[in-house]
Image (spheres, rainbow, N blue to C red):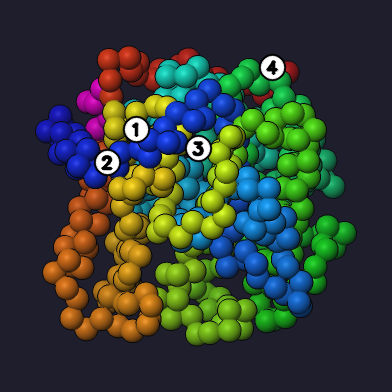
Amino acid sequence: DSNDITEVQNYTKAKYAQPNEELFGVAKGKNVIKIHLESFQSFLIDYKLHGEEVTPFLNSLVHDKSKDFTYFDNFFHQTGQGKTADGELIMDNSLYGLPNGSAFSTKANNTYQALPAIMDQQEGYTSAVFHGDGKSFWNRDKIYKELGVNKFYYDSYYDMSPENVINYGLKDKPFFEQSMPYLENLEQPFYAHMITLTHHHPYLINEEDTTIAPAETGDGSVDRYFQTARYLDEALKQFFDDLKEAGLYEDSVIMIYGDHYGISENHNRAMKEIIGEEITPLKNAELQRVPYMIKIPGVDGQGVNHEYSGQTDVMPTLLHLLGIKAQDYITFGTDLFSKDHKEFVPFRNGDFITDKYSYVNGTYYDNETKEKISEPTEEMLKKRETVMHELELSDKVLNGDLLRFYTPNKEWEPVNPNDYTYPEKGE
Ligand code: GP9
Ligand code: MN
């Protein structure tokens, strides 16, 4: 009930981090392009296989000479069983997924106060999601209406001829290529979300699409993981070229993120060969890093930023860049560019990681020495309480549909799902 939302509100307002004055509103009214790198873990960045870079294009953004991007190398996914759906939910709502199942599936009729709706109401953005799969996968066609997504381009909008398709759906190269005309025709400013798909378990790829030999661990998924990552990297390079040609690169905010791990703990034997060390519980937690990169027009990229951070932090960060007060909304993360950004990253299972120590599976570890901490400090124990509390509050929001009882500010209008439709192409 409304007491519960007050408890949530008190927590998120206390955690809130004031914006960095220099960056608040710098991207006001700019187009925003958010690119989802399916199953992409940060260990791929700068990784060399057979002496070759696996993702030369992404690496070039990280070591960006033109100073476009800032790369967060201590950014973690926070997803649970909802995988991609959790990634989407977290990034656009700064809420956690549920401990079991996927909120996209079970909480599709909840009230949300998500980025697409906020950006529309506050700054007149048109939001669009692009994805080369059926519209109902992960219940997207239902929940997007509650999130306020204006346009949804799914398989019906793409040429899904057999040569364009593998595994779950459209290959990333035709996906980006065929998305361009739709993107160019969107009313501006837009918030576009491009969800890639080819780099997905079990990492199937046609021989003619490979440009790097597989790894040689004997574990097929792990071995092909590098080939589909290379394919994604090439698709991305082509997309950037197309954006530049269309005049949509320079003046847009571009965000790139990984949704969740690609290689599960079932592949620890092969991963030991890849990483060159035993996959301990701590190492496994460290491997949950996914990329987060952002380009802000008119602002020099910082190169590599080492702030410990996670997917919940993206929504308040973007709001502040757009000049929208994140404080009005229920957000569990904090602005990555704020000097008060909170450097602890809860994982969905209650483990967490900070800039100095980690809590994994009941044990505290020193990040530097990797040693177990036999006597955790009061502060460490308290942090664990905070993390549990935060996850519980987020679960209360979803399970109690609490945003029904929350009015962010006097301008806010509740999203009406009936205002949104996602017709087939030509319908
Ligand atoms: C399919 C997709 C895959 O549309 O986005 O989701 P995942 O299996 O990664 O959760
Ligand atoms: Mn996914």
Image quarter of residue 415: top left
Is residue 140 left or right of 247 when viewed as pictured? left
CA neighbours of label 3 inside 10 A, class few (<14), some (14 to 19), many (20+): some
Q: Position of residue 140 (x, y in %)?
A: 52, 35
* Above or below: residue 186 compared with residue 346: above
Instruction: Report the amino acid beneath label 1.
Output: Ala
Image quarter of residue 11: top left
Kindly report the distance in space between the C-alpha atoms of the residues bearing marks 1 and 2: 8 Å
Q: Name the residue under label 3.
A: 139
Q: Mark 2 points at which residue?
A: 16
Work out whether mark 3 precedes mark 2 in sequence or the reverse, and give the earlier one: 2
CA neighbours of label 1 inside 10 A, class few (<14), some (14 to 19), many (20+): many
Q: Give the range drawn in magenta.
A: 402-407
In the image, what residue occupies the spot 31% across and 77% down? 365
Tell me the number on the disc at residue 71: none
Determine whether the residue tagged by mark 4 lies in a helix, strand or loop.
loop
Foreground tag (2 vs 4):
2
Work out whether mark 1 precedes mark 2 in sequence or the reverse, and give the earlier one: 2
Kindly report the distance in space between the C-alpha atoms of the residues bearing marks 4 and 1: 37 Å
CA neighbours of label 2 inside 10 A, class few (<14), some (14 to 19), many (20+): many
* Above or below: residue 414 compared with residue 163: above
Kindly report the distance in space between the C-alpha atoms of the residues bearing marks 2 and 4: 44 Å
Q: Mark 4 points at which residue?
A: 427
Query: Can I make out residue 147 in this image?
Result: no
Kindly report the distance in space between the C-alpha atoms of the residues bearing marks 3 and 2: 31 Å
Q: Residue 399 versus residue 372: which sits nearer the camera? A: 372
Q: Position of residue 294 (x, y in %)?
A: 55, 45
Kindly report the distance in space between the C-alpha atoms of the residues bearing marks 1 and 3: 27 Å
Pointer 1 and pointer 2: residues touching (CB < 8 Å)? yes
In the image, what residue occupies the spot 74% across and 28% down? 247
Instruction: Report the amino acid beneath label 4.
Output: Glu
Instruction: Report the amino acid beneath label 2.
Output: Tyr
